[in-house]
Image (cartoon, helix red, strand yellow):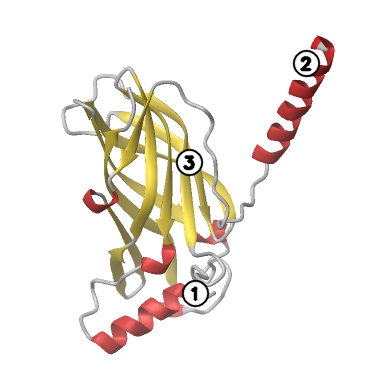
Amino acid sequence: MKKTAILASFAAALMLSAFTGTSHTDLNATEVAAPAKGRTFAVETSASEVNWNAKKVTGEHYGKISLKSGQLQVDKNRVTGGTFEFDMSSITVEDIKDAGMNGKLVGHLKSDDFFGVDKHPGATFVITETTPIAKAAAGQPNYNVKGNLTIKGITNPVSFPATITVKDGVATAKADVTVDRTKYDIRYRSSNFFENLGDKAIYDEFTVSFNVKAKQTNS
């Protein structure tokens, strides 16, 4: 009986390893982060903010994306893991004031040229590693964060510096994350894939800035 239990556990571990090794994810399924020690902090979506900024040859556009849910794992006042889910159907544009032009761009961003929201309504980010930055100045990034970002069902690793605080059952995290859209099959007007675009080219990298607040849910 003991030998059978050991073999069953080993088989389950192999299946889990095979699953987590995949690089493409169905965004309608929930991505599960690796188990982390310590306390769980639930993200307060109403008190958190996610902004995006994309540049092109002739200017830029910017707006917001709603954070649908999220949690952070904290061990001894250090963030050790976390999972975030973004509602891509909530994307807004803030730099265009004309209602008609604004709606046209929002609709284009939701189309298959960009985020394909009908097929991929969500995006996820899972923290895989956090490393404290030695002697970080107050108010400046004090962690290097690594994780897996999934957009349009495609997962790629990303890394960035972040300013993270944990105090009195509240955790906050701020960071600017640079994303190469072409890695997620968003190639519209990319000069790396299309020639002679001139001033119609859109730069491949865009920035996602987040300011997240989370509260402890367990002891």
Residue designated by label 1: 189
Residue designated by label 2: 6
Dot 1: element = loop
CA gap, disc 2 and disc 1: 54 Å
Q: Amino acid at mark 1?
A: Arg
Dot 2: element = helix
Q: Residue furthest top?
A: 2
Q: Residue at x 24, y 19 (%)?
A: 135
Q: Residue at x 52, y 70 (%)?
A: 116
Mark 3 vs 2, N-terminal side: 2
Q: Amino acid at mark 3?
A: Val
| Front residue (pair 215, 86) | 215
210 in relation to 160, above or below: below
Which numbered mark, 3 or 1, is in the foreground of this view? 3
Residue 49: which numbered mark, if any?
none
Q: Residue furthest front?
A: 1
**Image coordinates for residue 27, horizontal then vertical, percent:** 55, 56
Q: Residue at x 53, y 72 (%)?
A: 118
Residue designated by label 3: 126
Quarter of the figure with the N terminus: top right
Left or right: 22 as drawn, with respect to 65? right
Alpha-carbon neighbours of circle 1 within 10 Å: few (<14), some, or many (≥20)? some
**Image coordinates for residue 43, horizontal then vertical, percent:** 32, 43
Mark 3 vs 1, N-terminal side: 3
Q: Look at the numbered discs 3 and 2 and tell me whether their residues touch, using CB distance below 8 Å.
A: no
**Image coordinates for residue 171, horizontal then vertical, percent:** 26, 33
CA gap, disc 3 and disc 2: 30 Å
